[in-house]
Amino acid sequence: MLVSLAPLTPAVRNKIMEEDKLIFGGHLVAFIDILGQSHQLKELYKIKWWEDRIGVKDILSSTYGSVLKLRKDMSTIIETFSKPSTEKQLGQVIPQEIRDVYNKATKTKIITQNVSDSIILTVQLQIIDSIIPLRSVFGVLGGIGISMMTALNRGFCFRAGIEFGPCVFDKNSNEVYGSALSESVSYEKKADYPRIIVGDHLFEYLNDFSKLKEGSELYNINAAIAKRCLGILSKDQDGLYCVDYLGKRFKETLGSVDSSPMIKGAIQFITKQLDEHKSDPKIHGKYLKLKNYFESKRDVWGRELINF
C-alpha cells in the first residue's frame, strides 16, 4: 500500500498506487564514496590476475577489504547513534504518557544500500503521532562522522553528501530515487576532499524544527533533537555545511569514549598521504585541506594530540 508523505497529483498518485510498493515523500539521503578505489583497482591490469593469486589478494585486501570494513563499522556506529536520546541528552523530562510514541518514532529504520565502493543511507521522514524521526537523522549525521574518524585510522577515507528532499522509495528493490539522492551525490563531489557535506535543505529542515515553540512536550522533544543535530554541524570556509566530527559539540556527544587513538591513527595516515603525493599537487592539496581541518581543532583536542 502506498504511504504518502506529501501531496501528489492524481496522475502521479494513480501511477504509483499501481506499483503498490512505492513510498513517496520527504527523505534524508546520504551518499558515501570511498576514495582512491579506481586508482588501486587499475593495478589488477598490471599483473597476471588470472593466475597471480597472491597479487590479486593483496590488491583486493586494500580495496574491497576497505569497503567491507566501512560497511561493518558504519552499520554498528549508526545503530548506536540512532538509539533514543536520554532525558539528560535532551535536557528535559519525557512524560510517561508519551514515552511509547517517542520510542516508536525514534526507531525509524535507516535503510542501507551498498553499491560497489559507495553506500547510500535512506531515512523516511514520516511524521508519527506528531514526532519526527529526528533521532534517526542524528544517527546518520553522527554515525558518518565517527565512521570518518574510524576510516582514517584504518588507512583509507571517503567523501559524503547528505540532503533532505522528495524521493520515491521502492520496497521491492530497496532503492531510493529522487531529489535528495541527486543532491547528495552532487554534494559528495563538491566535498572535493575527505569531508561530509550537509545540504542546505537539510540544514533548513533541522533549523525550522529547532525553533518550534508550540509548547507541548512532543514539540519540545522535536526541537531538542533538532538542536542536537545542528550542534554537530559547522559552516566550512567555502560556505558549505559539514559534519564537524572533531568539533566541541561532537566531542561532548561522544561522552567518555576515548577518541585519541583514532585521531592519532588518522594523523599518521594524513601525514603518509601528504608525503606519498607531494609530487601530485591535486591529490596533495586535498590532504592538505584535511590536515588544515585537523589543525583547526587543536583548541578542542589539544596541541599534544593534533601534532603533525
Image (cartoon, grey):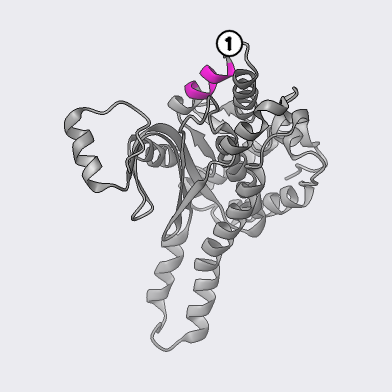
- Residue drawn at (47%, 57%) of the image: 36
Q: Measured along the vertical axis of the image, is residue 21 above or below residue 162?
A: below
Question: Left or right of 159: which side holds 50?
Answer: left
Quarter where residue 81 is shown:
top right
306 vs 240, left or right, is: right
- Whether the magenta-drawn stretch holds residue 284 is answered as no
At horizontal 67% and vertical 47% (from top left) the residue drawn is: 80
- Figure check: 122 above or below 297: below
| Boundaries of the magenta span | 204-210
Expressed as whole percent of the image width and height from the top left, the position of residue 18 reads 21, 45
- For label 1, count other residues whose C-alpha is less than 10 Å away and answer few (under 14), some (14-19) or many (20+): few
Whether residue 247 appears in this view of the structure is yes
Residue 47 sits above or below residue 308 on the image: below
Relative vertical location of residue 200 with respect to residue 151 in this rendering, above or below = above
Q: Quadrant of residue 184?
A: top left
Residue shown at the point (50%, 73%) measured from the top left: 59
The residue tagged 1 is 214
Q: Amino acid at mark 1?
A: Glu
Which quadrant would the C terminus be assigned to in this image?
top right
Secondary element type, mark 1: loop
Examine the structure image and report whether residue 206 is included in the region drawn in magenta: yes
Residue 298 visible from this viewpoint:
no
Q: Residue 292 placed where, x, y %?
A: 63, 37
Q: If the image is split into quadrants, where does the N terminus sit?
A: top left
Query: Can you give x and y, in whole percent of width and height, for residue 11 in the image?
Result: 16, 32
**Residue found 55% across the figure and 67% down from its top:** 65
Left/right placement of residue 227 relative to residue 197 reads right
| Main secondary-structure element of the magenta-colored stretch | helix
